[in-house]
Image (tube, rainbow, N blue to C red):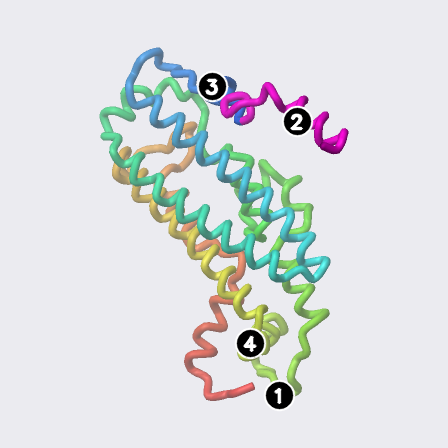
Amino acid sequence: MHIISLLVTNMNHGLNYSSYLQLENILSNQILQSGDIHDEMLFIIIHQAYELWFKQIIYEGKSMISNIENGELFSMLHKLKRIRMIFKLVVSQVDILETMHPDSFASFRKYLGTASGFQSKQFREIEALLGIEKQSALKSFSELYLKDNIWVSFLKHCIKNVEINENSHNEFNEIESLLLNIYHKKSLYTEIMEMFLDIDEGIQEWRYRHLKLVERIIGFGTQGTGGSEGFEYLKNSLSKSFCRELWSIRSIIFNSEYVY
């Protein structure tokens, strides 16, 4: 055996499932502020799981910006698919939270203090990374919006690398015209655009399920946890999109007889 391989084998000899995953640290960090109210454990675990998945989305997203810059579009598409599946998973976790009754949540809500999902820096980072700008988030997490985002990076790559036909739609803006050209070429770029739509739809689905969860547990007239606007804030977030131009060209494609 090669000496380096032997050293690595010896170094990892004491590593097991628990120590590799740092389970002692992870499983000891569900601290019930209420002391012993049963459903608080579920509330904590679900939100910790969200944050772990958010971390993975950010990890994939940052890597995608490098993929775009290097023209590695197949790698980018693969990661977009992974992010879409993660959003499907986090949406499904709402089903578990909905097993909590209003009186169960009310029994420990006061122990949350000023804690609110609005304070999730990782979710704000996901929004910034994708290209969703929200004035409410800009105030608290302005540093996140100073970095490159995936959507703009992709558009810049397309402008630089995709040939625009001379007979493009002049009545639409530059981005829409570019995206229409890409769409009709039926290339890898088109698949990436469709995956962007899938992810944007997935985020909106997550927002909608979160909205209905809040309505189901605390109602639509109650102030949100940590003093947020609760139901109204979530309702106003439903229409936020990072790729609005991709949505706008759908009706153009459907209603147009123009062929590239």
The amino acid sitting under disc 4 is Leu
> What percent of the width, then of the height, locates residue 185?
57, 78
Is label 2 or label 3 in front? Answer: 2
What range is drawn magenta here? 1-20
Give the left or right position of residue 68, taking residue 106 as reference: right
Residue at 57 percent across and 52 percent down: it is 130
Residue 74 falls in image quadrant = bottom right
Magenta includes 9?
Answer: yes
Earlier-in-chain disc, 1 versus 4: 1
Q: Magenta region's main secondary structure? A: helix
Give the left or right position of residue 190, taking residue 86 as reference: right
> What percent of the width, then of the height, locates residue 46?
39, 31
Q: Identify the residue under disc 4.
A: 180
Residue at 48 percent across and 70 percent down: it is 248
Q: Identify the residue under disc 3.
A: 29
Quadrant placement of the C terminus: bottom right
Quadrant placement of the N terminus: top right
Residue at 49 percent across and 65 percent down: it is 194
Q: Are marks 2 and 3 in contact (CB under 8 Å)?
A: no
Q: Identify the residue under disc 1.
A: 167
Say few, some or many: other residues with alpha carbon within 10 Å of mark 3 (under 14 / 14 to 19 / 20 or more). few
Is label 3 or label 4 in front? Answer: 3
Q: CA distance from mark 2 to mark 1?
A: 63 Å
Earlier-in-chain disc, 4 versus 2: 2
The amino acid sitting under disc 3 is Asn
Does dot 4 land on a helix, a strand or a loop? helix
Q: Is residue 181 shown above or below 150?
A: below
Earlier-in-chain disc, 2 versus 1: 2
Say few, some or many: other residues with alpha carbon within 10 Å of mark 4 (under 14 / 14 to 19 / 20 or more). many
Q: Identify the residue under disc 2.
A: 9
Residue closer to the observer: 54 or 19: 19
Say few, some or many: other residues with alpha carbon within 10 Å of mark 1 (under 14 / 14 to 19 / 20 or more). few
